């Protein structure tokens, strides 16, 4: 048993499928854009964390150096 369809029905189905495909593509593009945006934000946050860590490490290093110098001065004055 064969089903024959009119050309106009085929054209409507083709058009409907085309619209559905276009809608799906647009949704996927929006999702990809959102993922890329979130990935960029995550990378920025990670970069900021690393910068803050480096700044904090520099401060702690300077603080340790000052404490070391104070300890040396105290030791020198105690030995004299």
Image (tube, rainbow, N blue to C red):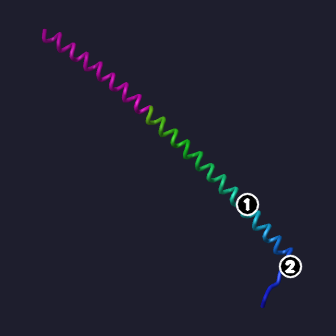
Quadrant, the N terminus: bottom right
The residue under the point 57% across, 46% down is 38
Q: Where's residue 35, x and y in %? A: 59, 50
Q: Which residue is mark 2?
A: 6
The magenta stretch spans residue 67: yes
Asked whether the beta carbons under mark 1 and mark 2 sit within 8 Å of each other, the answer is no
Find numbered disc 2 in the image and state the secondary structure of the residue it sits on: loop
Rendered position, 48 above or below 30: above
Rendered position, 71 above or below 46: above
The magenta stretch spans residue 71: yes
The residue under the point 17% across, 10% down is 77
Residue at the left extreme? 79
| For residue 3, side relative to residue 44 (left or right) | right
Q: Where's residue 14, x and y in %? A: 78, 70
Report the front residue among 66 and 24: 24
Q: Dot 2 surroundings within 10 Å: few (below 14), some, or many (20 or more)?
A: few
Q: Dot 1 surroundings within 10 Å: few (below 14), some, or many (20 or more)?
A: few
Look at the image and give the residue range highlighted in magenta: 52-80
């Amino acid at each position: 048993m064969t089903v024959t369809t009119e050309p106009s029905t085929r054209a409507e189905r083709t058009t409907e499928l085309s619209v559905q495909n276009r809608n799906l593509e647009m949704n996927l593009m929006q999702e990809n854009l959102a993922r890329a945006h979130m990935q960029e934000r995550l990378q920025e946050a990670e970069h900021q964390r690393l910068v803050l860590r480096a700044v904090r490490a520099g401060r702690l290093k300077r603080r340790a150096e000052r404490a070391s110098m104070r300890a040396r001065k105290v030791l020198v004055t105690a030995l004299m």
